Image (cartoon, rainbow, N blue to C red):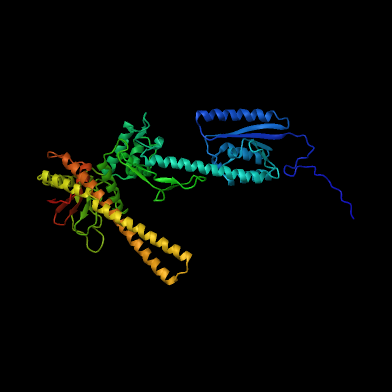
């Protein structure tokens, strides 16, 4: 039998350092607190002081640094600059040992924790978790880290769910919160509620006014930038998207739609627009309005009207997509004549006038004449002002009564619930006992088709209710405009024009028929 002699290991398997070497291990500490409150800041400073003294008190360790992060969540290491710098220094050979309080201080994400530990382990860098008494280069280290990291990750999940529950409870209670630093027009008042900032509110009103005068979001953004008016975040340059968001945000009319977006995953913190995945809450009259509700709704209608008109049309001026050609039905567009002379004038003519085989015979109109024609027809409408107002109020009252729609929607909802139950019972029965599959598919298809029809009906009822609400708001704007005009003549204003007029049709014989928001048609001649 051969003699076997054991030659003892002389170097550490992980670090490669000789076991009889007396060189000190380059040691760093890592400290982190989750919030930036004063109380936690004290804890943060105490941790830095503790690790500095703790490392320096060990003769076998050489103090390198204490790396820190404050006010940062641990679920994702990508946004922790102190942590990332420490890891990079360790990989560069500047650190042999990292000391930290616990696994949860290091990372609450299992994947990040293990990835980082393994990356450090490959370079011979060890991590010591004091609370759990784990050295990562120990044979049992990785198993213990996996277990502890998983527990820490579940703790983060629990905290995230509790925070989400708290937010949704506040939403359900109608409590509105804002990122005031990036929201124009409001600040947090002493009572914690939304408070109007007068100078910023004027900017919001200016944006709405310019839009109703026919300006595009691009043009408004350029105007605000040229006037050196700061953006919601205090920057100098406005973007059209910012203007669009202000024009469509319901908070400016005093209402609030809550939970427009939600966090998909507590680890990635990825947020997504809420398209029905989680509940939304609409709070009416939650705070003081900057824009009157009727004017806000008028702007939404104008936004939709411009979209329907198509991108090929030049949206410039108060009469954009308001004048129709009586020959072809196309909209009129603005044209500038004699642009470089004192005879410069803006005219409106059919956009399709010179398209196709035969050109439209409708005449062009000067802007000033369009304004005069509108005031003429408004005067005719005002001759029976009280009757028009009474009829308008009667229509608004009828539009407000949605009892039939709501009753039918409730019936459809109940029937959908019954059909869904029938489908579920059929599926359960097929899973527990042998059924004729052809008969099963026939029944399932029948139930599914029935449910789809009910779903379509419910969608139609919702759209009908939305249409009535929009009509009600348009009538409300029309009525407000009519009540403002108590005596004639009045000066032309774009706001009044939009409130009163749906569109005007220009005919080849010189007639211009104005169709008002209440459905009345009044004709005049060029």
438 in relation to 215, above or below: below
Query: Splitting the image into 4 quarters, where does residue 222 fall?
Result: top left
x, y percent for residue 427: 44, 63
Q: Say which residue appears at 21% left-offset and 54% top-offset.
A: 324
Going by the image, does 271 lie left or right of 388?
right
Q: Nearer the viewer, residue 367 or 189?
A: 189
Q: Residue furthest left?
A: 383
Residue 18 occupies quadrant: top right
Quarter of the N terminus within the rendering: bottom right
Residue 170's x, y, as percent? 39, 39
Labels in figure, total: 0
Question: Is 158 left, or right, of 175 in this rendering?
Answer: right
Asked if residue 223 shows in the view, the reply is yes
Report x, y in % for residue 239: 38, 42
499 and 423: which one is in front? 423
**Image location of residue 288, percent across then percent down:** 30, 35
Query: In this rendering, does residue 112 appear at all?
Result: no
Q: Depth check: 233 or 284 in front?
A: 284
């Amino acid at each position: 039998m051969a003699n076997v002699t054991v030659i003892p290991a002389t170097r550490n398997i992980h670090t490669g350092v000789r076991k009889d070497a007396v060189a000190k291990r380059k040691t760093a500490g890592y400290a982190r607190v989750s919030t930036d409150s004063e109380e936690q800041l004290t804890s943060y400073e105490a941790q830095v002081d503790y690790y500095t003294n703790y490392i320096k008190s060990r003769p076998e360790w050489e103090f390198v640094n204490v790396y820190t992060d404050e006010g940062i969540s641990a679920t994702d290491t990508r946004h922790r600059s102190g942590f990332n710098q420490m890891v990079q220094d360790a990989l560069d050979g500047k650190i042999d040992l990292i000391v930290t309080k616990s696994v949860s201080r290091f990372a609450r994400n299992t994947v990040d924790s293990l990835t980082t530990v393994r990356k450090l382990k490959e370079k011979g860098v060890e991590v010591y978790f004091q609370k759990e008494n784990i050295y990562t280069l120990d044979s049992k280290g990785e198993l213990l880290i996996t277990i502890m990291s998983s527990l820490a990750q579940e703790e983060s999940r629990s905290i995230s769910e509790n925070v989400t529950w708290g937010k949704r409870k506040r939403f359900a209670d109608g409590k509105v919160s804002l990122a005031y630093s990036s929201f124009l027009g409001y600040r947090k008042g002493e009572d914690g509620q939304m408070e109007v900032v007068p100078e910023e509110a004027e900017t919001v009103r200016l944006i709405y006014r310019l839009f109703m005068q026919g300006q595009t979001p691009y043009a408004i953004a350029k105007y605000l930038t040229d006037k050196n008016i700061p953006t919601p975040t205090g920057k100098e340059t406005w973007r059209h998207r910012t203007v669009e968001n202000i024009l469509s945000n319901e908070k400016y009319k005093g209402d609030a739609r809550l939970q427009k977006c939600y966090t998909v995953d507590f680890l990635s913190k990825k947020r997504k627009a809420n398209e029905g995945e989680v509940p939304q809450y609409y709070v009416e009259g939650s705070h003081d309005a900057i824009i009157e509700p009727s004017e806000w709704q008028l702007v939404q209608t104008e936004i939709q009207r411009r979209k329907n008109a198509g991108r090929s049309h030049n949206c410039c001026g108060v009469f954009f997509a308001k004048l129709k050609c009586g020959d072809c039905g196309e909209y009129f567009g603005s044209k500038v004549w004699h642009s470089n002379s004192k005879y410069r004038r803006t005219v409106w003519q059919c956009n399709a006038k010179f398209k196709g085989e035969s050109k439209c015979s409708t005449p062009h109109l000067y802007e000033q004449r369009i304004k005069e024609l509108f005031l003429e027809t408004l005067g005719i409408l005002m001759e029976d002002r009280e009757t028009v107002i009474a009829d308008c109020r009667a229509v608004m009252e009828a539009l407000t009564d949605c009892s039939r729609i709501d009753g039918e929607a409730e019936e459809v909802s109940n029937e959908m619930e019954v059909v869904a139950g029938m489908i579920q019972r059929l599926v359960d029965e097929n899973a527990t006992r042998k059924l004729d599959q052809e008969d099963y598919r026939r029944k399932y298809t029948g139930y599914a088709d029935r449910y789809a029809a009910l779903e379509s009906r419910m969608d139609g009822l919702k759209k009908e209710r939305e249409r009535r609400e929009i009509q009600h708001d348009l009538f409300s704007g029309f009525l407000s405009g009519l009540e403002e005009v108590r005596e004639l003549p009045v000066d032309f204003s774009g706001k009044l024009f939009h409130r009163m007029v749906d569109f005007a049709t220009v005919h080849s014989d010189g007639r211009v028929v104005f169709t008002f928001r209440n459905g009345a048609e009044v004709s005049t001649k060029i």
